[in-house]
Amino acid sequence: MAVLLLAEVAGDTLAVDATAKAATAGAKLGDVTVLVCGPQAAADEAAKLDGVTKVLLADDAAYANGLAENLADLIVSLAGDYSHIIAPATTTGKNILPRVAALLDVMVITDVTEVVDADTFKRPVYAGNAVQTVKSTDATKVISFRTSTFDAAGSTGSAAVETVSGAGDKGLSAFVEDKVVESDRPELTSAKIVVSGGRGVGSEENFAIIEALADKLGAAVGASRAAVDSGFAPNDQQVGQTGKVVAPDLYIACGISGAIQHLAGMKDSKVIVAINKDEEAPIFQVADFGLVADLFDAVPELTEKL
Amino acid sequence: MKVLVPVKRVIDYNVKVKVKADGTGVDLANVKMSMNPFDEISVEEAIRLKEAGIASEVVIVSIGEKKATDTIRNALAMGADRGILVTEDQGVDLEPLAVAKILAKVVEEEAPELVILGKQAIDNDMNATGQMLAALLGWGQATFASEVKIEDGKAVVTREVDGGLQTISVNLPAIVTTDLRLNEPRYASLPNIMKAKKKPLDEKTAADYGVDTTPRLTVVTTEEPTGRQAGIKVGSVDELIAKLKEGGLV
Ligand SMILES: Cc1cc2nc3c(=O)[nH]c(=O)nc-3n(C[C@H](O)[C@H](O)[C@H](O)COP(=O)(O)OP(=O)(O)OC[C@H]3O[C@@H](n4cnc5c(N)ncnc54)[C@H](O)[C@@H]3O)c2cc1C
Ligand SMILES: Cc1cc2nc3c(=O)[nH]c(=O)nc-3n(C[C@H](O)[C@H](O)[C@H](O)COP(=O)(O)OP(=O)(O)OC[C@H]3O[C@@H](n4cnc5c(N)ncnc54)[C@H](O)[C@@H]3O)c2cc1C
C-alpha cells in the first residue's frame, strides 16, 4: 500500500508534531510519501521522519496558506499512485481532505483514532459518546487522523526529496491575512501539561492566574467554549468537540463545569485535575483529583507552592 | 443575491446518547431532536445578510426523514423565506458525499450565490459536507467562519484555524461553513412561529434528483468509549500537590 500524507505547514515551517503523528498512523497502512507545500527547509525536516520513504516538495505561492481549492487539485493530480491519502485532523486537514475526497468521488473518513486494517477505522461520534468502526469500500481512502491518539514518529530518517508542480492558482480564493497568536508556551495539542480555564475564571484579566500556573508548569493554556465566547481567551485555545482535542499527561481544569462537549476534547488525558467550587460539577466525574475550592484562592496557591 | 442554507436535524446537544447494547448504533428512540447548532448559526447569518439588504432571499433545505420538516419550519420562524425538504428513505443518515451530491442538484436548480452550511453536524462530527459540495460545484470554500463580509462579488471571510485566525477572500458563488463565534442565533418569536407555518415548503425525494446515494462506508460496530472512573477528592492544595508529586506529574 502506498500512502500520501499532506504535511502540516505553519507559516514557513513544518509543524513537526502533527505531521509526525500522522506519519505514525500512515505507517500502519503502508509506505508513506509526504507532500510538503512550503519551502525546501520544511521538506528536509519531513524527510527525517521515521517511516517516510519519500518527500514531494511543492514550493509554489499558490500552495502556501493552505488554500483548499489549489491544494485539493494538486493532491488529486498525485492521487493515482496512492491507496490512502491522509493528513492530521488539523483545521488545514479538515478543510482540504473532504474536498479531495469529493473530487475523487470517495467518502472522507475524518478524525480517525485507530487503524483496524487497511479499509477499517475507528472514529468517535456524538461528542465522543460513541465510537464507530467504519469500513470503506472506496478505491482510495481519504482519512484525517486525530493526532492526540498517535505517538509522534521519530526523526532519524533521511528520505529523498523530489520536487513536484501542479496547475497552480485556480483563482477561486485568495489569502488576505493571518492573525497568528504568538506565544512562548508549548503548543496546546502537543503539550505534556495543559491548564484550562472556563467561565468560572470570570474575565480576560483574571485569565492571568491560569496563565501564571501554566507558566510555572511549562504548560499550554486551554479554555472552554464559554471562556472563548466571553472573550477571556482566544479561539485557538478552545478544547472540546468543536475545538481542539488534547490528551496530555496532566490536564488541570479550573472553573470548568465539564459539559460533554468539553469532555470530548480532554477525557483521554492521562491525569485530570479539576478545581471547581461546585462539588456537584460533572467535571468531578472524570477527574482523578478533584479539589472543591474557589479557583481564585486555589490556583494562585498552587502556582506559589509548586 | 439568493442564499441557500442546508440544515440538519440532529440529536439535541444536551442529550447524552446511549449506545445500543448490540453494537448496531445509538438509541435515537424518544430522544429530543433539534436543528444542528451550527446550522442555527448559518440561518442567523443568512437572515442578517437579508436584513442588511445584501441577500434577497433565504432558502432552507434539509435532507432526511419527514420529521426534518420541523427543522425547516424552525428556520422559517427565525426569518428564512421558504424551504425544501428532500426525503430519503434509506433508514439511515446519508453520508456527506451523498448529501453534497443532492445539495449540488439543489444548487443547480436554485442558483444561489452563497451556500452557508454548518462546519460540522454534532451527531457524526464529520465536518465534510460543505467542502464536498464546494468540490462538486467547482466553487471556492471558506470554512470555519467567524466573520463574513460580502463585497465586490467576493466573500471576505475570517476563519477560526488552529493557529488563530485566517482571513481569505473567495469569489462568489461560494461555500461558507460556520463556526461558533460567527453570531448568536435569535430565538423565533411566537408570531413568527405562526407565520412560518404558512411559508412555502416544497417536498422532493432523493430519487427526484437521480443521485446515487449508496453508502461508501459501512458501520461495522458502534461501541461505548472506554470510560473513565471518577477519582478522589483532595482536601487542600497541599494534598493535591502531594498527589501530583507521587504520580511524578510535577
Ligand atoms: C454546538 C456546540 C459545540 C460546543 N463545543 C464546545 C467545545 O468544543 N468546547 C467546550 O468547552 N464547550 C463546547 N460547547 C459548550 C458546552 O456545552 C458548555 O456550554 C461549555 O463547555 C461550558 O463552559 P464552562 O464549563 O467554562 O462554563 P459553565 O458550564 O458555566 O461552568 C463554569 C463552572 O465554573 C465554576 N466556577 C464558577 N466560579 C468559580 C470559582 N470562583 N472557583 C471555582 N469554580 C468556579 C462553576 O461551578 C461551574 O461549574 C459547545 C456547545 C455547543 C452547543
Ligand atoms: C449509528 C449510526 C449509523 C450510521 N450508519 C450509516 C450507514 O450504515 N450508512 C450510511 O450511509 N450512513 C450511516 N450513518 C450516517 C452517516 O455516517 C452520517 O450521517 C454522515 O457521515 C453525515 O455526517 P455529518 O452529519 O457529521 O456531516 P457534516 O459534514 O459534519 O455536516 C456539516 C453540515 O452539512 C449540512 N448537512 C449535513 N447533512 C445534511 C442533511 N441531511 N440535510 C441538509 N444539510 C445537511 C449541514 O449544514 C451541516 O451543518 C450512520 C450514522 C449513525 C449515527
Image (cartoon, helix red, strand yellow):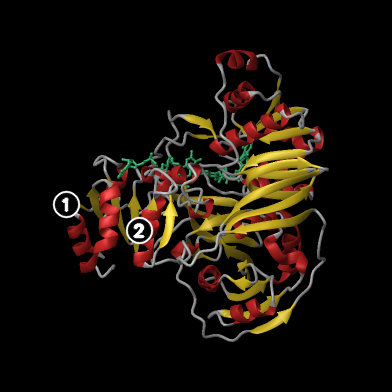
**In the displayed structure image, the side of residue B140 where residue A211 appears, left or right:** left
Question: Where does residue A100 sit, x and y in percent of width and height?
Answer: 69, 58
Q: Work out which quarter of the rendered image holds the N terminus of chain A and state it.
A: bottom right
Q: How many marks?
A: 2
Which structural element holds mark 2? strand
Chain of residue at mark 2: A
- In the picture as drawn, the residue positioned furthest to the front comes out as A205
Q: CA distance from mark 1 to mark 2?
A: 19 Å
Which residue is drawn at the image coordinates 68% and 25% (left, top)?
B80
Which structural element holds mark 1? loop
The one nearer the camera, B241 or B224, is B241
Q: Residues within 10 Å of mark 2 (few under 14, many from 20)?
A: many
The one nearer the camera, B176 or A107, is B176
Which residue is drawn at the image coordinates 43% and 31% (left, top)?
B29
Q: Residues within 10 Å of mark 1 (few under 14, many from 20)?
A: few
**In the displayed structure image, the side of residue B153 where residue B142 appears, left or right:** left
- What amino acid type should be assigned to the residue bearing mark 2? Tyr
Q: Which residue is mark 2?
A: A251
Which residue is drawn at the image coordinates 67% and 72% (left, top)?
A35
Question: Where does residue A287 sit, x and y in percent of width and height?
Answer: 28, 52
Tell me if I can see residue B229 in this picture: no
Checking the image for residue B17, the label placed there is none
Checking the image for residue B235, the label placed there is 1
Question: Where does residue B81 sit, x and y in percent of width and height?
Answer: 71, 23
Front position among marks 1 and 2? 1
The one nearer the camera, A260 or B126, is A260
Q: Is residue A4 above or below residue B122?
A: below
Cβ of mark 1 under 8 Å from ligand 1: the answer is: no
